[in-house]
Amino acid sequence: MAFPDPLERLIRALERFPGVGARSAERMALHVLRSPREEVADLAVALRDARLQTLRCEKCGNVTVDPLCNICADPERDASLVCVVEGPREVEKMESAAIFPGIYHVLLEAFAPREGASPEPAALRSLKERVASGVVKEIVLATAPDREGEGAALIVLEALADSDVKITRLARGLPVGTRLEYLHGEILAEAFRGRRRFQGETKPTTPD
Ligand SMILES: [Zn+2]
């Protein structure tokens, strides 16, 4: 073993972060050793608190500190309009663009990396329940226009096949492969305004 055990353990732990390889984990770990002790203590507390003090919203699955997120809890939001997104970052993006008056439904495990991800059975089940309650008039599918996003959109469409809720998809003007979180607010607003009824006609952008 090249490093003392506590350092090795830190490197192994950092390596588990998405996009962090062995070399960056090593660099980060050595940076921790050079950092002031108080800073490292703050980091440890922040890591723990972020994990322990956040929940998933009972209604939409977004990250929250209360049982209901502040969007679902806001009586001004239009509960008949539900935007289906992949994760909390997409909610954040839609919110900062300030274009959406409705509420959300987060499809994927809020804390899971995207690779190979598909909608959680629990998220689909709760979406069906929300639709069955009769409050929802329109479901706007805002998953990314890439293979996973299109796949997720089709799965939702299928899951809601028995309901007569109106299902729309963000306009196809979005650059292929662009994740919602990287889009400029104005482009996103246009895609939202141009949303169309979705019947599964769009194909995955890359073949299997
Ligand atoms: Zn919520």
Image (cartoon, rainbow, N blue to C red):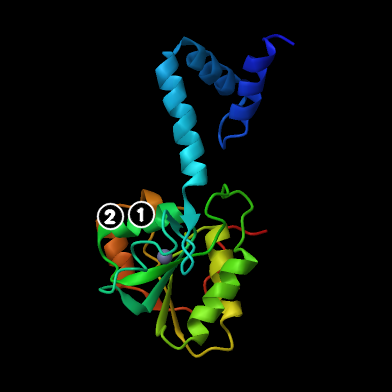
- Asked whether, in this view, residue 88 is left or right of residue 188, the answer is right
| Residue 200 percent location from the top left of the image | 54, 77
Front residue (pair 87, 59):
59
Q: Residue at x 42, y 55 (%)?
A: 64
Q: Residue at x 52, y 86 (%)?
A: 132
Badge 1 amino acid: Glu
Question: Mark 2 and 1 residues: CB-CB less than 8 Å, in contact?
Answer: yes
Q: Which residue is mark 1?
A: 92
| Residue 4 percent location from the top left of the image | 67, 10
Q: Which residue is mark 2?
A: 96
Image-quarter location of ligand 1: bottom left
Q: Cβ of disc 1 within 8 Å of ligand 1?
A: no
Badge 2 amino acid: Ser
The quadrant of the picture occupied by the C terminus is bottom right
Residue lying farthest right?
Answer: 1
Front residue (pair 168, 131):
131
- Is residue 199 in view from this perspective? no
Cα distance in 3D space between marks 2 and 1 = 6 Å
Measured along the vertical axis of the image, is residue 102 above or below residue 117?
below
| Residue 156 percent location from the top left of the image | 56, 73
Measured along the vertical axis of the image, is residue 170 above or below residue 178?
below
| Residue 78 percent location from the top left of the image | 31, 77
The local secondary structure at tag 2 comes to helix
Q: Residues within 10 Å of mark 1 (few under 14, many from 20)?
A: some
